[in-house]
Image (tube, coloured by chain):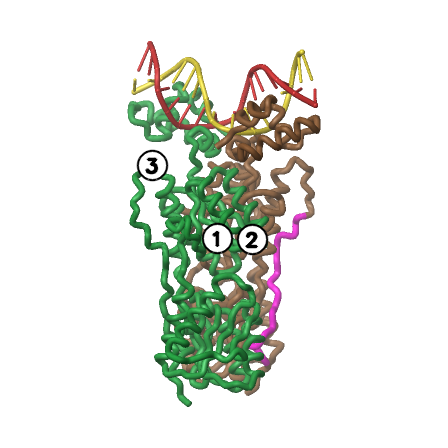
Chain colours: A green, B brown, C yellow, D red
Amino acid sequence: MATIKDVARVAGVSVASVSRVLNNGPKVSKATIEKVTKVMQELNYSPNANARALVTQKSTTLGVVIPNLIDPFFASLAQGVEQVARQKNMQLLLSTGLVSAETERQAINLLIERRCDVMVVHSKKLSDQTLIDLANKVPGLVLIDRYIEQIAQRCVWLDNLEGGKIAARHLLALEHKNFACISSKYQIDDPLLRLKGFQDELKSTGVMIETKLIEFGEPTLQGGEIAAQNLLASGKSFSALFVYNDAMAIGAISTLEDNGFKVPSDISVLGFDDVLLSRYSRPKLSTLNYPVEQMAMQAANIGIELVSKQPTNPDNKNCKHIPRLVKRESTSYRSN
Amino acid sequence: MATIKDVARVAGVSVASVSRVLNNGPKVSKATIEKVTKVMQELNYSPNANARALVTQKSTTLGVVIPNLIDPFFASLAQGVEQVARQKNMQLLLSTGLVSAETERQAINLLIERRCDVMVVHSKKLSDQTLIDLANKVPGLVLIDRYIEQIAQRCVWLDNLEGGKIAARHLLALEHKNFACISSKYQIDDPLLRLKGFQDELKSTGVMIETKLIEFGEPTLQGGEIAAQNLLASGKSFSALFVYNDAMAIGAISTLEDNGFKVPSDISVLGFDDVLLSRYSRPKLSTLNYPVEQMAMQAANIGIELVSKQPTNPDNKNCKHIPRLVKRESTSYRSN
DNA sequence: TTGAAAGCGATACCAA
DNA sequence: TTGGTATCGCTTTCAA
């Protein structure tokens, strides 16, 4: 592959000149520009980004760390970062495979070795302190879907607690009185907070959920099916069901309908996340919109802001996002 | 950030030695290893991948070019490549934004500038010749979801024609006699071949599809809904419907049921691709499985093979994949 | 407006 | 087993 030297030699100029036309340098004669440009085409020259990164000390690379790409939620996250990347003329470097703190750490290390200018990290397993240390070390690091007080301005997160409350209010407004919940069996923040918010809000109006009407399961379609079976098996009745995420909600609906319950006329079901799935299910799922893609874009932009020499505008306080209720077909007024 | 020189200086050895322990070099004393390792930790040293890439002339980077990450189909593709990447200790560089030949070309150029060792490219807009030229220029380039005869060994593709035939055979075996089709309005290979295969197979048993019972639409949920409306509006009756992809199929089912037709008892519906959606829809969608993820892994591995100095084994002739029928709930025996 | 040369951070060859 | 050093491809002063 042709190098800058080849171009310089063939064009009969110095490498400095070639470099100048390559970067639209300030002082180059039209003649040189034309000559060099022509030779670059002839030789099919393509500048070596690695060499460039080495000398300029910036890689124009945006790194993302997510568990996987299969989950549409994370795919959207990556897509958001990607959008900013192409908008800013940067490239996307992706590191997946978050199973443990160990692998999360590895993924981040890879991005550091690549000298990513900015990185958007989704980490659930790494400790607060580790992340804080990392953030201090890597100027362009931004956390998404996680809130750590000490580095609050570098966390873009969703208020899950408020989400739970919004869910409760919606169902309450539909005059429901008997509630059930399906949550994730994984004891991380998100499910815990969503459930807590839901319960808190109900409590404030004097309503309690019976323990038997709270089920925990795998946060998948099947998990939702099974959880709903258990709910039904409890013998307790309910007319409104708040579910941890859309996949579980769809699974739950499936079980409910198989058992003769109509959604929403017999039972209202409310999901969370508003992934693509929710628009495709029948009945179309009412849910809480989690604007990951925009949040990812914001995170990427904050990262870029952080590494730019520009005076940081201190107005990006607004990293907290509130989920938005999306009423579709799976929730309605209590009928019985 | 600490460099190899810093480490060498602090450890009181030469950079050569540091480099050796970094790469598990062949001849290093235990003492040096320990000393250097300790200093590396102290200084929080992280080798610069760009510098490395420059001198070794290999970037340990796997590039992927896809239209976007939102479409689960492409997310799976990327995930497949990612899997190979981490397995081989490489990184994933992602380029999206395929709208035109122009942007496809740009995306590929970016990967070239980054000196990606191997790249898996999904291109629909670039011409055969352009791709052939590119392939000759970039040794590690592999095409996915496209077949070009001149570079057949570097194309990993699905036999859409055969897919259409399999679909026809399935519906025929269920004793259907009156068929309808919904295809994509975009005149690229995939929809054309799927439809052709379907029609060819029917024809071979003496069955024809009326023109009015072939609809073209946007390959989305809404597109499927609209296409099904048009089908219904034609007044012609049919008991089996073959749809271009799963999203459209789910949209079509939605319309059919809204109009009082039961799926599959009144009308059998068969999709294509077997994306996540198809398992979540009700009734669960019968479809043809498109093993993108595995195909992407194969493509990545072929690329790696191509750039390795190892004698290329010529047995990867098997780049053609046949979709597999997945019977779920949306197809059944003709009842009327 | 142009060119010569130093240097970015690593690897690898050649001596010692 | 170690160290010195040329080199990878490019950018960026500093002089001319």
Q: Is residue B273 visible?
A: no
Q: Are marks 1 and 2 in contact (CB under 8 Å)?
A: yes
Residues flagged by tags 3 and 2 on a common chain: yes
Decide: few, some or many residues near mark 2? Use Cα within 10 Å; few <14, some 14-19, many ≥20. many
Residue highlighted by disc 2: A98
Q: Are marks 3 and 2 in contact (CB under 8 Å)?
A: no
Decide: few, some or many residues near mark 3? Use Cα within 10 Å; few <14, some 14-19, many ≥20. few
Q: CA distance from mark 1 to mark 3?
A: 25 Å
Residue B77: name its quadrant.
Answer: bottom right
**Chain that bears disc 1:** A
Q: What is the three-letter code of the residue carrying label 1?
A: His
Element assignment for label 1:
loop
Please identify the dominant SS of the magenta region. loop
Element assignment for label 2:
loop
Q: What is the three-letter code of the residue carrying label 3?
A: Lys
Say if the magenta span includes residue B325: yes
